[in-house]
Image: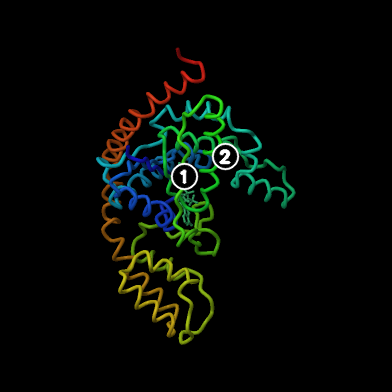
Amino acid sequence: MKKTILTGIKPTGQIHLGNYIGAIKPALELAKVAEYRPSFFVADYHGLTKIRDADRFRQLTYGIAAAWLAFGLDPNKATLYRQSDVPEIFELNWILACFASKGLLNRAHAYKGIVESNQQSGKDLDDGVNMGLFTYPILMAADILMFKTDLVPVGKDQIQHVEIARDIAEAFNKNYGETFVLPEYQVEEETELLPGLDGRKMSKSYQNTIPLFEEPKQLQKLINKIKTDSLPPEKPKDPESSTLFTLYKEFASPVEIEAMREQYLSGIGWGEVKKELYRVMNTYLEEPREKYKELLASPKTIDEILLMGADKARTISTPFLKEIKKKIGLLA
Ligand code: ADP
Ligand code: TRP
C-alpha cells in the first residue's frame, strides 16, 4: 500500500519564498518517492476566511495552482485539486466539528493570537474573528482525514493544526473504531520558518514577503531589502545564522554553497552576498516564472487540470464518506 502525502495552500496572496521552501519544495521532493501517493490542493475555502473580493479570490486561486504546476508537479502522477470541488470534505467537516471540543479550538494559535492582540488593545476579545477562522483547524482536519493521509509536509506554523487533526481523528476512532488514519507532519528542520523582510515570519498576512514570480528587477529590489546586521564587509560572518545564506542554500549548487560559506568566514559584504543570491535565485526561477505566466494566461487549462484532480480525489472521498456515514448511523 502506498502512503498518502497531502498538503494545501490557501489563496490569500501571491506564492512567496516561505511557501516554496516550507511547503512546495519539500512536498515535490516527497512526490518523487515511489512509495508515496501525492495529493496537493488549493485550500480555497480556507482563503475565504480572509479574501472578500471575488475577482481577486479567483486570480489568487489560479495563482496557487499555477505555482504547483510551474515547479514541475505532474498532474497525471500527483492529484492536484481545488478544495471546493470536493464536496465530501465539507460534509466531513461537520461530522468532525461534532468531535472537536471548543476548548481545543480556543487553543489554536491563529485564534489565540487574535484574542491576545485584542486583549492588549482593549478591544472586544473576539473582534475580527469570524467562525470560519475559529473553526479553521476542523476544515483542515477534514482535508487531511478525508484522504487517509499519512504524511503532511508543512511549515512549522502548521504543526499544531496537524496535531489537532490527530486529536479529532482519535476522538472519532475511540467511539466508532479504527476509521481515520492518524497523520504525521513533516517539517523542514533546517529552514523551519523563513523570516520575512521585516524579520517576522514571512507571511502573506504580514505583507513582508518575497513573491516567487516577481519580475527580475523587482526580485532584486526585494532581496536588497532583506535585513542584515551592520558588520562591516571585511569582518567574518556566521553563515548558519544568516537568512541570506539560508536562502542561498536553497538555490545554489553544492560547489557554490561551499564557496559562499568560505567567503562568509573570511569576510564578505552583505551587498555582495545579495547580488550573488539574486543571481542564483533568478537563474533558478527563470523557467518556472515563464511557465507560471503561460499558465495564468490560460485559466481554462488550469481549470481542466483541477477538475481532473477533483475527479480523482473523489474516487477516494465518495466511498470513504459513505463508510463514515454508515458508522455514525446515517446510512444503512
Ligand atoms: P502564509 O502564512 O503566507 O499565509 P500559508 O499559511 O498559506 O502562508 O502557508 C502555506 C504553506 O507554506 C504552509 O505549509 C506553511 O507552513 C508554509 N509557510 C508559510 N510561510 C512560511 C515561512 N515563512 N517559512 C516556512 N514555511 C512557510
Ligand atoms: N492551513 C494551511 C496553511 O495555512 C493550509 C491548509 C489547509 C493545509 N488545509 C491543509 C495544509 C491540509 C496541509 C494540509 O498553510
Which one is in front, 325 or 69?
Answer: 325
Identify residue for label 2.
Answer: 133
Q: Does 60 sit above or below residue 318?
A: below
Rendered view: 252 above or below 1:
below
Q: Quarter of the image for the C terminus: give it.
A: top left
Percent coordinates x, y for residue 270 in the rendering = 45, 78
Give the quadrant of residue 87.
Answer: top left
Residue at x-position 35% and y-position 75% = 258
- Check disc 2 and report its element: helix, strand or loop: helix
Circle 1 SS class: strand
Q: Where is residue 124 in the image (x, y as percent from the top left)?
A: 72, 42
- Residue shown at 44% from the left, 82% from the top: 265
Q: Kindly give the residue lying farthest to the top in the view shown.
A: 332
Inspect the image, locate mark 2, and give the three-letter code of the amino acid beneath it. Leu
Image quadrant holding the N terminus, namely top left
Left or right, 203 with reference to 320:
right
Q: Splitting the image into 4 quarters, where does residue 287 fall? A: bottom left
In the visual, does 190 lie left or right of 65? right
What residue is pinned by disc 1?
184
User: Within 10 Å of the Cα at label 2, are there few (<14), some (14-19), or many (20+) other Cα atoms?
Assistant: some
- State the separation of the CA atoms marked 1 and 2: 23 Å
* Residue at 51% across, 48% down: 158
Q: Which amino acid does label 1 sit on?
A: Glu
| Mark in front: 1 vs 2 | 1
Q: Tell me: 320 left or right of 292.
A: right
